[in-house]
Amino acid sequence: MPAVIRDKEDSESSSEDEQEDHPCIVWYGRKIPVLIFQAEAIVSKDGNIRSVGERYNLAFKIVRTESRLVRGILINHGFHEVHPNSNDFNLMWTGSHLKPYLLRNLQDFQRVNHFPRSYELTRKDRLYKNIQRMQQIHGFKNFHIIPQTFVLPSEFQEFCSSFSKDRGPWIIKPVASSRGRGIYLVSNPNQIPLDENILVSRYISNPLLIDDFKFDVRLYVLVTSYEPLIIYLYEEGLARFATVRYDRAAKNIKNQFMHLTNYSVNKKSSDYVSCDDPEVEDYGNKWSMSAILRYLKQEGKDTTLLMGQVEDLVIKAVLSAELQIATACKMFVPHRNNCFELYGFDVLIDSNLKPWLLEVNLSPSLACDAPLDLKIKASMISDMFSLVGFVCQNPLVRQARPGRAAHDRSFRYQSQKPQRPSTAQPCMGFTKGSNHPARVINHPWASDPYQPLTLTPMD
Ligand SMILES: Nc1ncnc2c1ncn2[C@@H]1O[C@H](COP(=O)(O)OP(=O)(O)O)[C@@H](O)[C@H]1O
Ligand SMILES: [Mg+2]
């Protein structure tokens, strides 16, 4: 913890801290200015929106990744970019996990976009092992949220015995990869290489189809704290469609454009249809999640039940890695609000309307190839930054001021006793039916409280 030094500035009421009415500032505890992000800044370049970041000299650095969207939103809020080696930043946005020494040196107002050991969720093998452990502790059916999986070559025998009961097809995946790379279907254990570490998962062969096409959904999940656990699910997501009509016949087993729904895979198909109008959300190979829900509702499907199960799945997946990540935070992270993380959940809905978790992505793609991407992702990132809570503090001013510690935005949760896991402890903001996706997840300073969710009681 940095020393809290009462200096001259503290005893005076600095003009900087005098409350002003500004659309980008919310005053926490009447004293601490905190930045509220505006999604429209990405297009409007409004000087008034920039003024707060400029006045407080807010800074960010981007390390080992590139994101035009994140950079654009920050710059349009008056942040300036510093060198990746600089320590004078409010936000470090990185594409990979952070070394412990980098975390240990963080000051209380600094934010980084990863938790230590997030790979417990985002590596496919670790995710499965963690959920399997929860199945053993809390009952299989309570954590039956992910297709059965074996880690090869070590579990080859177990896989063969499951294969003898369910002859597939099964799906092979590298343990830590993305964008459909290295993924293929097999119908016989002989087709599986045993000289590399891979996963073999039960293939969900009855996906819900729209117009005969398979799709999955990318959902955005923000965790702002692991102790206490605080989870937000963004109300909007993206559905990605395959480019070839689904047909279970064995002869199609090698057709990636039919069985994989990744944008990276299907954009290579000549049948890929993109949409140039951000207001049209149900056309071509990428739809908004809300367009999917509207479509299903029209078909008479119970979308409230579906989304309840999706929320349940999100909470349970995060819970499965909670202990490891919270322990790492205790070891390496000096202040409770330093870390936050945006996860990309890939969810497949089957024809019985059961959602299955396929994987959790570290650093989900923020690329905006289509106008719909920009519309959804700009709002989502703006809301995320508002939730994360950037205290308007000049990073060049090192001394923390008395009372600053009290701005900790998680204080409102501190009274909650850690209770596991059948309680409402994880909180998730989920605003339904909003026609303005920018207003999604309530921020902790908002006066309108969001509803903590209750997990389905477990046996
Ligand atoms: N168990 C499964 N059943 C059916 N389809 C699956 C299954 N696992 C993956 N897929 C399909 O393969 C795609 C890629 O799988 P995923 O686990 O998300 O890996 P990647 O990291 O390469 O995106 C998914 O988007 C989905 O279309
Ligand atoms: Mg994926």
Image: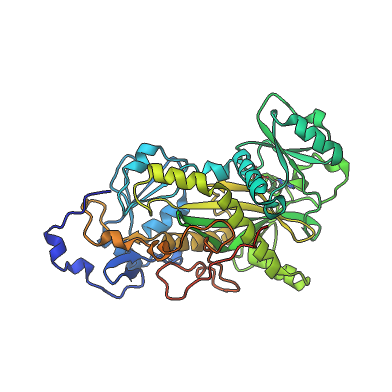
The x, y position of residue 416, in whole percent, is 45, 63
The x, y position of residue 217, in whole percent, is 66, 56
Q: Nearer the viewer, residue 430 or 458?
A: 458
The x, y position of residue 196, in whole percent, is 67, 27
Look at 74% across and 38% down and name the residue there.
184
Q: Position of 71 compared to 296: left or right?
A: left
Which quarter of the picture shows residue 41?
bottom left
Look at 74% across and 30% down and name the residue there.
156
The x, y position of residue 332, in whole percent, is 38, 42
Look at 24% across and 62% down and name the residue there.
403
Residue 219 seen from this side:
no
- In the image as oriented, which residue stretches furthest toward the front? 459
Q: Position of 82 compared to 68: left or right?
A: left
Position of the C terminus by quadrant: bottom right
Q: Nearer the viewer, residue 239 or 408?
A: 408
In the rendered view, would you say 229 is above or below 174?
below
In the rendered view, would you say 434 is above or below 87?
below
Q: Position of 263 compared to 392: left or right?
A: right
